[in-house]
Amino acid sequence: MSTEEKSLNFIEQIIEEDLKKGLPQDKLRFRFPPEPNGYLHVGHASAICLNFGLGIDYKAPVNLRFDDTNPSKEEQEFVDAIKRDVEWLGYQWDKECYASDYFQQLYDWAVELIKKDKAYVDSQTSEEMAIQKGTPTTPGTDSPYRNRSIEENLDLFERMKQGEFEKGTHVLRAKISMNANNMLMRDPIIYRIMHAHHHRTGNDWCIYPMYDWAHGESDYLEQVSHSFCTLEFLPHRELYDWFLNQIYDESKVRPKQREFARRNLSHTVVSKRKLLQLVTEGHVTGWDDPRMSTISGMRRRGITATAIRNFAKTIGIAKRDNLIDVSLLDFCVREDLNKVAPRVMAVLDPVKLVITNYPEGQEEWLEAENNPEEEILTYRKVPFSKELYIEREDFQEEAHKKFFRLSLGTEVRLKNAYIIKGESVVKDAEGNITEIHCTYDVDSKSGSGSEASKRKVKGTIHWVSIPHAIEAEIRVYDRLFTHENPDGNKEVDFKEYINPNSLEVITGYLEPSLQTAKELEHFQFQRLGYFCVDKDATPEKLVFNKTVGLRDTWAKVSVQ
């Protein structure tokens, strides 16, 4: 990787320094190590882009490793979803690994720690251990079981493995120091008893390694050169290194843990525990609800992999936690969809428009441009008839001076079609407009080459021919939370900030070219925003999700 090509972030500087100190280029190996206890979210997306991006930049392999050490919360569903998300983002791992692949080796190393008098079985309750561990300002006290004999510890640990004891009766702890300033170093737990079925190893094990024990040793077994994780793991680095010291062979690569800042997204939560709450309590329809911060939810909403990668690149890597405004993600989405999404016409708040001088029963198929961003422009045909739907907001009976859409006595152009002039309205008993009557200039058809077709009017509006319109369910999404940082106030339950108007379901009318649209196909509904086909769509009923508006118009809801 040429350092002249770009300025390096601090993670890349660490790698470059290690290479200068003699780490062979072919010994570089990175990893992305999710726990399969939920779906990945936007924070994971940044970590995925970081680790796999380093793999691409340095031509180094990247492992996908599942840290599956807690069977009570892990499921194959989550494993499958994680693999699907990483692939969808455009990355391919070198090896698919699991901490459970190493359960026997981790157990054997734990036995060696006992034999070296560096680990012991503690039979205190969790409450007793919490008390004797001390506080950040006061030292801990030794467990009454800390000086058990090596023989007794080996016997108890073997019997723990065989399933002789109930959960909570014993744990295996590393024997480090109860006076360490870093509380994680005060004889941390290495193994606990869990009589739980594991999604890969079944009922083979009754004891499971703690994350801190399994993580660094798994990195070492896989010969990962750099273990990058978020800042909350900074205090764990000392323990990571202590565990490695117990088993490290100098002929092998020693993994190096370094930390980067979590990039939180405004108006969202990214805690798996809180995301699970939203799902199980029915605040959303599932892990892939388009309002969720999960990768699955973002994909279903219509956010593209390219947009997420560009977002991760834009926010970069930092040493301090930061709250990123979600409007930056929206910008990246618009920038990508603008290039790739075909333009189509749809009306979401319809009012009927009748062209009184258009021949009864006549229809035309007019030419419409698909996307002006295309290198080679392509076109489609859209039907035109006497009766159309237009957006209700595109008409004012008595317009103010800056209103350049349709009103009585004024002219506008119908997109890809004719110039029309508002003549009269029909109202119901309550005074609501039910029909707009207008006339059209027969010679003003777009692209006809006539002088009338070149005539300029101030406004252009979109429309859909009523006899040809397709009815569709349109799901319009807003921010899931009214507060930009729903996790920010620890005294308030984050669910207090759930936006009651985060989803509006309406009926829209679309041009017929959309009849064959497939799941996740993206479109720009002209003048309305970007939309994609939802997985709930059927040939009988189209369903579209609004991905993002054409500009950032979302007004922040005031928090009481």
Image (spheres, rainbow, N blue to C red):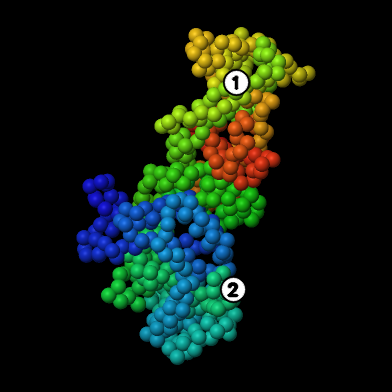
Give me the disc on residue 196.
2
Q: Which residue is mark 1?
A: 394
**Percent x, y of residue 138:** 41, 69
Judged by depth in the image, the label closer to the viewer, 2 or 1, is: 1
Give, as a three-letter code, the residue at label 2: Ala
Callout 1, which amino acid?
Asp
User: Viewed as shown, does residue 258 lie left or right of 191?
Assistant: left
Q: Residue at x 70, y 18 (%)?
A: 361
Q: Tell me the crowding category of disc 1: few under 14, some 14 to 19, or many 20 or more residues within 10 angstroms, Cα based.
A: some
Q: Quadrant of residue 519?
A: top right
Q: In x, y percent, where is residue 175?
A: 40, 79
Q: Which residue is more in the foreground, 152 or 512?
A: 512
Rendered image: mark on residue 436: none
Indicate the position of residue 549 as horizontal and vertical percent values. 52, 34
Q: How far from the left and from the top, in percent, is residue 463?
A: 61, 24
Residue drawn at 38 percent across, 60 percent down: 62
Q: Residue at x 51, y 33 (%)?
A: 342
Q: How many marks?
A: 2
